[in-house]
Amino acid sequence: MISKTLELNKKKKRISNSKKFSIISYGCQMNVSDSEVVASILESIGYSYSDDINNSELVLLNTCSIREKAEQTVRKKLESINAVKKINKNLKVGVLGCMAERLKEKFLEEEKIVDLVVGPDAYRDIPNLLKEIEFGNDAVNVLLSKEETYADINPSRFNTNGINAFVSITRGCDNMCTFCIVPFTRGRERSRDPKSILKEINELVNNGYKEVTLLGQNVDSYLWYGGGLKKDFNKASEIQRRTSINFSKLLDLVAKNFPKTRIRFTTSNPQDIDDTVLETMAKHNNICNHIHLPVQSGSDKILKKMNRKHSSDEYLRLVDKIKKLLPDCGISHDMICGFPYETENDHLDTLSLMNKVKYDFGFMFKYSERPGTLAARKYKDNVPEEIKQRRLSEIINLQLKHSFENLSTYIDKYSNVLVEKESKKSKDYWCGRNPQNIMVVFPKDGYKIGDYAKVKILSNTSTTLIGEAIKK
């Protein structure tokens, strides 16, 4: 008993004496997942997490480059951190992720506050780069990898509710949409060993997590045949091809092995999702009935310029198939307006597609030219800003209309809700998502975070269902 107490005291002393780090994540869920990998790497060399940058020796910004606005947000944050660094001379500042990969060494020139620049595939090198800073050298590693998936690193869930967790299953993207910088900042597609995925989920379940989201730039293109890039699958042996695991098989494995755990996944690509994925979803009650299905435009002309591998008709047929096989499935989208050469008729095609699908919710943006993409090299950004803004407003307003109409169909019905956190508007209410990924708010009534609640829906807004749970 005494030896255990001494060991505990030693552990507490190590934690109190350790250097502090902070991570601020921007952009997609993949960045959140990557930040957890970085945190694990830092903890392995004696750092501990702090949510206070004023109390940290190292501040890392995990960045997004998908739109210019995202990069501007990072630069503004660096300005505020600069004020902290003037007081804390020992503070080191690092930029991670897609923006680091895009700008590389230029970051050190443009932002004098930055000490460390690390791309998405180089996080294992952070301990060495921190040593380079101590020696007064530039600390930059933005090399892309054909193999890296961080499969053997147990992510540190440093900023979590202990209920929901992200598990990355693929990295990179091969689709080469002309507007997208992801293939250049995250590299080619490679999938993670399913055994390591199941192992990570098992650890999460043992630690009390109730919901897991499988992550990838395009989860439906997941393909494990023993390692390597997806494009090299045809070079694999006959046995490798015959025993390969695609996304529907992986999804089935996860659902079977963890029947009491809610399973979600994102993001799907219309060209890659197939009937077997939908059939697997229909077979397992623990796979949530929600598919995020980016379309980007309702115009075939614009889809072709975007290098999307589907037409609007093919997309609508896929939506019809989803609704037939999964009648209560929620569908959400990504939409870009103002792409080069988009006419008013192209915009009306987008609104028409939205009226046919009637999405539950979506993420809608103005086109933002990204340096290095094919669109930036090939097409003139020729839609005036005021027209982009007007079209975006029309898309958002139509989506709000559809969202309100869809959510109103839940009234007087019951939703199975996983309690995730306290409502922002009232300490007397919980909130959590239903299987369709819609937020539900209801009085606490004896429930706690991590409980499942059967909630009768009484009213709705365009984004939220409001109800009351069956009392415990």
Image (tube, rainbow, N blue to C red):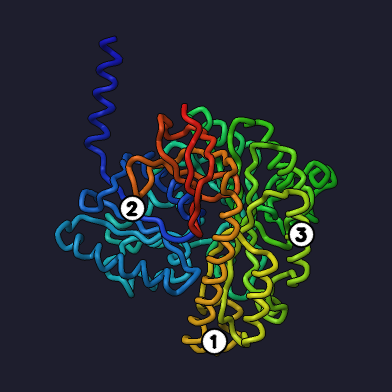
Query: Which labelled disc corresponds to residue 381?
Result: 1
Q: Nearer the viewer, residue 206 or 405?
A: 405
Query: What secondary structure is marked by label 1?
Result: loop
| Mark 3 residue type | Asp
| Residue at the image point whose x is 34% and y is 64% from the top | 138
Circles 2 and 1: CB distance less than 8 Å? no
Q: CA distance from mark 2 to mark 3?
A: 52 Å
* Drawn side of residue 197 relative to residue 465, left or right: right
| Mark 2 residue type | Leu
| Residue at the image point whose x is 28% and y is 13% from the top | 3
Label whose residue precedes the other's in the sequence (2 or 1): 2
Percent position (x, y) of residue 246? 74, 47
Residue located beneath label 2 in the image: 130
Q: Nearer the viewer, residue 132 or 323?
A: 323
Q: Nearer the viewer, mark 3 or mark 1?
A: 3
Query: Which labelled disc corresponds to residue 320?
Result: 3
Q: Residue furthest left?
A: 87
Q: Residue furthest top?
A: 1
Residue 204 lies, with reference to residue 107, above or below; the image says above
Q: CA distance from mark 2 to mark 1?
A: 40 Å
Mark 2, Cα crowd under 10 Å, few <14 / some 14-19 / many 20+, is some
Percent position (x, y) of residue 472? 47, 26
Mark 3, Cα crowd under 10 Å, few <14 / some 14-19 / many 20+, is some
| Residue at the image point whose x is 65% and y is 47% from the top | 289
Residue 312 lies, with reference to residue 407, above or below; the image says below
Mark 1, Cα crowd under 10 Å, few <14 / some 14-19 / many 20+, is some
Query: What secondary structure is marked by label 2?
Result: helix
